[in-house]
Amino acid sequence: MAKGVKPISLYKLSNGAHYAFHDAVLSRIESDPKIKQKVPVQLERYRKAIQAENEALVLSKKNLLSDEIAEADSMRDTAYTAFKGCVKAFASIANADTQPAGKRLAQLLKDYNINVHDALYKQTGLMINLLEDLEGKYKPDVNTLSLNKLVDFMRAGNDKVRLGMAERNEQDSVKVTGAAAKARDLIDEIYDGIMQSLQAYAIVEATKDYDAFFASITQLVDYYNKRYIKLKGKKRPTNGKTGDTNADDKDKEEKKEGGDAPGEEIPDPIAPPSTPTGGDTPGGDDDLPDPLA
């Protein structure tokens, strides 16, 4: 590794932090004319690899199936809301032919207590069971109130959401272990090669012209090591022990979103500029300010 540059466990960084780190390194190389002209071929490969990771992370945020799932969810929610309103009306109207069916269905809906704003997985699971009841045990009541079409719409929407989520999960699992992981490995390999080459130049040329650059990268490594690796997933000790944090809101999809909680943040050791060098960071992390611009 290059003179004065500390090692960093890049594989431990989250996708967003990994991208931001390499984007910051790239900016430092390109802003130093001497460094830039020493590794032109490696630099071009580094630039392209970082762009590939960026594209992989952006794609992972927007699966093409998401629009279809959202459309089906909207159809399901509209049909369910209309069904619920009709049942309430029939249950409140004193009619011997329809009120008993309305009351039974009203109680059924109350028992399931489905909220169209719930997480997709939760709502979809409850709807599966509700639809089984509406198409089975309570089908005579549905027929009495002539609400079959609304049940059909709920069924069609719920099936599309369920199948769409399953297909999207399968695609995302391949994406995580495929494009993003491959891009990360390549970037790390190029980064190591660049630093080794620059170290060799510094030794052969016996000059201090590289010292400022090495110091800049070392400070960047220190910052990421302290803020995003050592305490990631840990809390500050309160009784002599560290505890794992658990931010598990993974299944809340588009309706409710959660984020990683890395524990108590370590202050930036170097005051950051007002605008981060790397711009917006894809991959789900909060913005990572460039401490060494």
Image (cartoon, grey):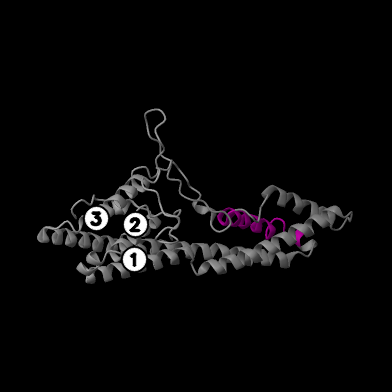
Q: Quick one: label 1 or label 3, which is nearer the N terminus?
A: 1
Residue lying at 41% horizontally and 39% vertically, measured from the top left: 244
Which residue is denoted by mark 1 in the rendering?
Answer: 50
Is label 3 in a helix, a strand or a loop? helix
Residue lying at 37% horizontally and 46% vertically, measured from the top left: 227
Q: Quadrant of the N terminus?
A: bottom left
Could you say where residue 136 lies in the image, as x and y percent from the top left?
68, 58
Distance from the alpha carbon under mark 1 to that under mark 3 = 24 Å
Magenta part, dominant SS? helix
Which residue is denoted by mark 2 in the rendering?
Answer: 21
Q: Quick one: label 3 or label 2, which is nearer the N terminus?
A: 2
Is 65 situated left or right of 230 in this image?
Answer: right
Distance from the alpha carbon under mark 2 to that under mark 1 = 10 Å
Residue lying at 67% horizontally and 61% vertically, measured from the top left: 77
Three-letter code, disc 1: Ile
Could you say where residue 89 lies in the image, as x and y percent from the top left?
82, 57
Which residue is denoted by mark 3 in the rendering?
Answer: 212
